[in-house]
Image (cartoon, helix red, strand yellow):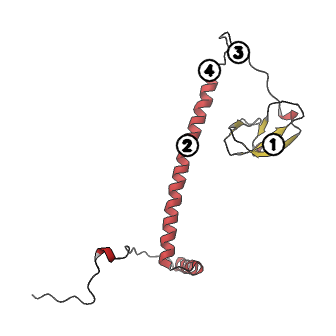
Amino acid sequence: MSEHPKRGRKPAPDTERKDRVIQTRVPKDLESTLKEAAERERVSVSHLIRNVLEDTFNLVDNIIADSAQLVDTVRRDASKLAASARRPELNTEGKQAQPTVEGPSIDDVEAWQEVLVNKPVPCANCGLILARGAKALRGLSATSGAASVWLCPPCLSKI
């Protein structure tokens, strides 16, 4: 048997070849959507799909990294809270200190100011720990030097 000569041009070396091609079937309405989006962005459908895939994988990677960091922060804060709840405070003689007088209550608050907290604080109404960066309401009181009263946004509607 004799070998038949190959038709067309000689294949390009690997270093000059383009990226790999992946084919997939899509519904007609998705095809229309892709074509319209590609036209709006002034790119080919192929480039649009490539960009969407890359952006999606980057987004998922960032969400996973941020979630892991959030879990670590919550775990650390929970450990600190648990540790402080387990050990009683001691006075200078090494004896258990008497409980301190409660700080101001919600009834002492004259106005509420919406803020982003910089340190974890407990909601005075439900006890939820508001993490750093969370929206909270700080109670404003006429009492000079009074401790802050914090409220989470859902509890504002309950009072």
Q: Relative to 82, say whether 123 is above or below.
A: below
Alpha-carbon span between mark 1 and mark 3 = 34 Å
Determine the residue positioned at 53% across, 55% down.
Answer: 62
Instruction: From the top left corner, tell me how far across and down residue 41 is, in percent.
Output: 58, 77
Determine the residue positioned at 52% across, 52% down.
Answer: 64
Tell me which label, 3 or 4, sits earlier in the chain: 4
Q: Mark 1 against mark 3, which lies toward the viewer? A: 3
Residue 71, label in figure = 2
Mark 2 neighbour class, 10 Å CA radius: few under 14, some 14 to 19, many 20 or more? few
Instruction: From the top left corner, tell me how far across and down residue 40 is, in percent.
Output: 60, 79
- Where does label 1 land, which residue? 158
Name the residue type under label 2: Val
Tell me which label, 1 or 3, sits earlier in the chain: 3
Alpha-carbon span between mark 4 and mark 1 = 33 Å
- Where does label 3 land, which residue? 97
Instruction: From the top left corner, tell me how far across and down residue 144 is, in percent.
Output: 87, 31
Instruction: From the top left corner, tell me how far across and down residue 13 is, in percent.
Output: 28, 77
Alpha-carbon span between mark 3 and mark 4 = 11 Å
Q: Quadrant of residue 29?
A: bottom right
Q: Mark 2 against mark 1, which lies toward the viewer? A: 2
Name the residue type under label 1: Lys
Disc 1 secondary structure class: loop
Disc 4 secondary structure class: loop
Residue ranking furthest to the left: 1
